[in-house]
Image: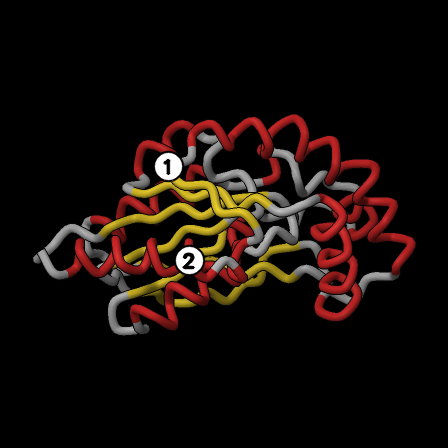
Amino acid sequence: MHKPILIGITGGTGSGKSTVSREILRHIGETDVCIIEQDSYYKDQSHLTFEEREKTNYDHPLAFDNDLLIKHLKDLLNNKPIEKPIYDFEQHNRKKETIKVYPKRIIILEGILILNDEEIRNLCDIKIFVDTDSDVRVIRRILRDIKDRGRTLESVIEQYMATVRPAHLQFVEPSKKYADIIIPEGGYNKVAIDIIVTKINSILNK
């Protein structure tokens, strides 16, 4: 049995990480690809009130349960299934339910801070940074958080200025230096996607 290939895809909020992941999945196919979102691994906050959970800095490395994420990545790389957490973004807490994920030949790990963590970096066979202008990213985040996460415009802007932007400058942007490939404009960069898909297919066909 082949050892799976782990591809890390990172970049700022709203950069197009998910679009790149979906494009790879579309080209390669679900038979050979599974996607793990770092967002699923926010720490359980059941011990906090809702008001306290609202104040958590979700763009800081300490917000993530990287120990569990690393354990799950190692399990998948050893061809063992995992129970992936589900995070409720409206309640700011982990759900009791989980999703069973089976190992595939290609594992895509997607998240804003995956290259910030040395142990996660070292597990990745290919490291990709999606580089998109900040004005585009903030507009995408506003639209997503209002539509998908039940947020108000004011709360999204307040959070962006208070925690998202500072964390991006402190943690996300500096992690670009660890990337093997930098993709400008994310999933809309068809040439970059084609090159990555060609590389993955060459690995699969070995």
Up the image or down, 129 lies above or below 30; here it is above
- N-terminal of the pair, mark 2 or mark 1, is 1
Kindly identify which residue carries mark 1.
Answer: 180
Give the x, y percent position of residue 173.
59, 32
Q: Residue furthest right?
A: 154
**Location of the N terminus (image quadrant):** bottom left
Up the image or down, 81 lies above or below 129; here it is below
Which one is in front, 136 or 62? 136
- Residue at the location (54% across, 63% down)? 96
- Helix, strand or loop at label 2? It is helix
Toward which corner of the image does residue 120 lie, by quadrant?
A: top left
Give the residue type at disc 1.
Asp
Which one is in front, 198 or 81? 198
Q: Residue furthest front?
A: 191
Give the residue type at disc 2.
Val
Q: CA distance from mark 2 to mark 1?
A: 16 Å
**Left or right of 154, for residue 206:** left
- Residue at the location (59% across, 56% down)? 94
Give the x, y percent position of residue 172.
59, 34
Toward which corner of the image does residue 70 lie, by quadrant?
A: top left
- Helix, strand or loop at label 1? It is loop
The label number, if any, that marks residue 191 in the structure image: 2
Q: Residues within 10 Å of mark 1 (few under 14, many from 20)?
A: few
Which one is in front, 174 or 199? 199
- Residue at the location (72% across, 59% down)? 140
Give the x, y percent position of residue 107.
32, 56
The label number, if any, that marks residue 35 in the structure image: none
